[in-house]
Amino acid sequence: MGNFLAGFLLPLLLLTAALSNWSLISLVDLIAFLLIQYTAPKIGFRFRRQYLLLWPVIIFSLLVFSSQAVYLVVWAVEGYKQSVGEAWWMKLIGFMIIQSWKSPTVIYFLAVQLLVVIVAVLDIHDNRFGLVQWRCSCWSNFLTAIERLGLFPS
């Protein structure tokens, strides 16, 4: 489970968050993606990796989620004024407004940031407690099948 979460799902979510908007927040998400991809396998100790990489990702994603939510509330209370919603420094940081309900990019971005937090917390929980209850379930068979994809039978 840990290999799937930290090795595949978390980098995929971080890359999705990085490519959804061109801003400083997306740059930090891209850097976190690259750090997880290139330094995590080389560190060696899973205990060190979870505290060196996953906790900053959790803190940053929670900070982004809460600040974007506060920005949307302030934007809605102010009456959708263009001067508040279209400031250049807010776009540079990465704050977005809801342009259209047909394609609410900001809602997708917030959902991805929340999923990043959930996956990172699950990976830390998996490393700390081992998730023994999942070893004897259908998830163990599913994850074993995913891990063995591409392996040749002996």
Image (cartoon, rainbow, N blue to C red):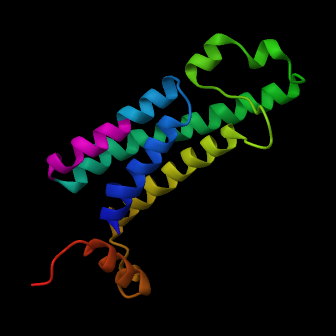
Q: Main secondary structure of the magenta part?
A: helix
Q: Can you say which quadrant of the picture contains the N terminus?
A: bottom left
As rendered, which of 101 and 35 lies closer to the eye?
101
Within the image, what quadrant is residue 103 found in?
Answer: top right
Q: Position of residue 60 (x, y in %)?
A: 48, 36
Q: Is 36 covered by the magenta stretch?
A: yes
In the picture shown, does residue 42 fall above or below 154?
Answer: above
Rendered residue at 51%/40% (across/down):
17
Q: Position of residue 76 (x, y in %)?
A: 84, 30
Relative side of 94 to 143, left or right: right
Rendered residue at 36%/32% (across/down):
31
Within the image, what quadrant is residue 36 found in?
Answer: top left
Relative side of 88 to 27, left or right: right
As rendered, which of 63 and 17 lies closer to the eye?
17
Rendered residue at 22%/55% (across/down):
46
Question: In this figure, what is the number of numbered marks?
Answer: 0
Q: Position of residue 20 (x, y in %)?
A: 55, 36
- Let me know if residue 65 appears in the view: yes
- Let me know if residue 124 appears in the view: no
In the picture shown, does residue 40 fall above or below 85?
Answer: below
Q: Position of residue 54 (x, y in %)?
A: 37, 46
Rendered residue at 79%/36% (across/down):
100
As rendered, which of 83 and 146 lies closer to the eye?
146
Q: Can you say which quadrant of the picture contains the C terminus?
A: bottom left
Within the image, what quadrant is residue 138 found in?
Answer: bottom left
In the picture shown, does residue 94 fall above or below 61?
Answer: above
Q: Which residues fall within the magenta stretch? A: 32-44
Most extreme residue toward the right, as rendered? 79
